[in-house]
Amino acid sequence: MTVAIVGAAETTQLGKIPDTSQIELHADAALNAMADAGLMPKDIDGVATAGESPVGIAHYLGIAPRYADGTSVGGCSFMLHVRHAVAAIEAGMADTVLVTHGESGRSGIGRGGRGGGGGAGLPDQFEGPYGGMGPTTMFTIGVLRYMKQYGMTHEQLATVAVVQREWAGMSPRASYRDPITVEDVMASRMIAYPFHLLECCLVTDGGGALILTKAERAKDFPQKPVYIMGTGESVETPMVSQMKDLTSSQAFRIAGADAFKSSGISHGDVDHLMVYDAFAHLPIWGLEDLGFCERGEAAGFIEDGNTRPGGKLPLNTNGGGLSYMHSGMYGMYALQESVRQMRGTAPAQVPDAEVSVCLGVGGMFAASGCIVMTNSESA
């Protein structure tokens, strides 16, 4: 292990922040992470970000970087930034890399357009004419196929949201904390069949930032270091309809396998798991594509209580994108929770956790990044 996370923080506020622009959210998160690590902008020589340009972030914060990464593949971009930062630090391209995220997903303050080729992109041409209207409709394609192929019930899908709300109930910063039942989920408004409102992600404002540096320096910082054990990344297709298998993510499988291989861990070594959950079915894909469950068995695994508080595989312990926070690109918040768990500072702390796996998705299964972290120097 050559690289460690030595600074980690979210924005001062999460949820609805109508008086703060998107770049200010980046800056707020970055300054909070620097304070967490005891650093100043002059101490940073690498910048990575998505949603905003690393050029704008470096200028706004007064950083003169030797390394810049603007990789943008959706919500898992920050997992890829961590992976690339590890490589850059190992190669001597930078000593201390700042990864930032900020998104005015709800309020839309200072949020520029993303472009998209004026409607000439592949999804616009080949999915849009058939009624595809963003994630709520596009993600239905895979989940409906999965339900048909493996017999997953509506109640099992709803259970994902119920379990994650249990975790969110222990987090003071979670957007929604009140307990819910399967019946509550099933009775919530239908958004796009089979997704009910409580099976869809939140729409919020906020951000977060991480600071990575050489592991040999890690103990010089005020917080408990979190070491990067392994990483992986992949992409598949910008069109969900063109996935090789609608019930499994090729990008998940490749990124996860590389992260496990490079870290040298087995599934039994994992104490804590974060799987990006913009919609309730994503943790099911993650559990299977990472190899924790056989195909078609993850919904039952969750229904049986294995991922609940006290279960054998704590999953999405902040409440996830369904209950904690989802500003549009959720990956940073999943990374933050993995760091908290490894530091031992999470509101819903998993006892004696030493290894955390964090899996992200970009687009509708278009991309993935996976990071394995530990708090043990000897792991």
Image (spheres, helix red, strand yellow):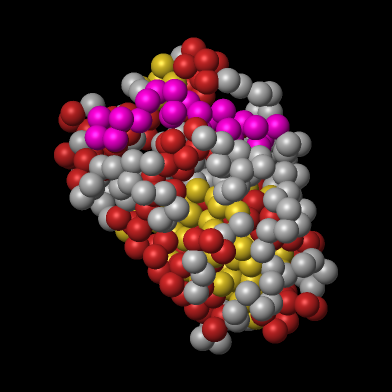
Where residue 61 sits, quadrant-wise, is: bottom right
Q: Residue at x 47, y 26 (%)?
A: 158
* Residue situated in front as seen by the camera: 341 or 21: 341
Q: Is residue 226 above or below residue 298?
A: below
Magenta-drawn segment: 148-169
Q: Is residue 248 left or right of residue 227?
A: left
In the rendered structure, does residue 324 fall within the stretch colored magenta?
Answer: no
Q: Residue at x 61, y 43 (%)?
A: 311
Measured from the top left, where is residue 314 in percent x and y? Answer: 60, 47
* Residue situated in front as seen by the camera: 109 or 96: 96
Assign the N terminus to one quadrant of the image. bottom right
Q: Is residue 246 left or right of residue 114?
A: left
Q: Total number of numbered labels? A: 0
In the rendered structure, does residue 162 fall within the stretch colored magenta?
Answer: yes
Measured from the top left, where is residue 42 in percent x and y? Answer: 72, 74
Q: Residue at x 37, y 35 (%)?
A: 135
Q: Is residue 121 above or below residue 167?
A: below
Q: Residue at x 66, y 40 (%)?
A: 309
Q: Is residue 29 visible?
A: no
Measured from the top left, where is residue 162 in percent x and y? Answer: 56, 28
Q: Is residue 259 above or below residue 272?
A: below
Determine the residue located farthest toward the bottom in the rendered image. 92
Where residue 339 sits, quadrant-wise, is: bottom right
Assign the C terminus to one quadrant of the image. bottom right
